[in-house]
């Protein structure tokens, strides 16, 4: 995937990604991290590996994936 494609995807999904924030102990997850989680998952990454790499919960990984999918389809 070209860098321009990633930037366009991020801009399309940025509004959706900003609405979903984790609990107060961790702070917000940036749209760039949510997009990275989703792309790695869609490329075959395991959720348990992504949790460790990005320091987010399992549910936030799945939420990131669905936010990006909804943003791209929207």
Image (cartoon, rainbow, N blue to C red):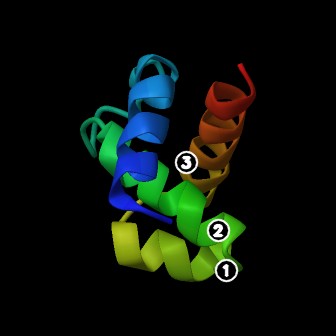
Question: What residue is at 71 percent from the left and 79 percent from the top?
Answer: 44
User: Which numbered disc covers residue 41?
Assistant: 2
User: Does dot 2 land on a helix, a strand or a loop?
Assistant: helix
- Relative to 22, 1 lies left or right: right
Q: Which residue is mark 1?
A: 46
From mark 2 to mark 3, how far is it between C-alphas? 12 Å
Does residue 13 appear in this view? yes
Disc with the residue nearer the chain's start (3 vs 1): 1
From mark 3 to mark 1, how far is it between C-alphas? 14 Å
Question: What residue is at 64 percent from the left and 79 percent from the top?
Answer: 45
- Relative to 45, 8 lies left or right: left
Quadrant containing the C terminus in the rendered view: top right
Residue 6's x, y, as percent? 42, 50
Q: Which residue is mark 3?
A: 60
Residue 73 against residue 3 in the figure, above or below: above
Camera-near label (1 vs 2) is 2
């Amino acid at each position: 995937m070209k860098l321009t494609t990633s930037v366009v995807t991020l801009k399309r999904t940025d509004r959706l990604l900003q609405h979903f924030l984790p609990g107060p102990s961790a702070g917000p997850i940036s749209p760039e991290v949510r997009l990275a989680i989703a792309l790695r998952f869609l490329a075959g990454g395991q959720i348990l590996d992504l949790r460790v790499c990005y320091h987010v919960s399992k549910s936030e990984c799945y939420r990131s994936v669905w936010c990006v999918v909804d943003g791209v389809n929207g």
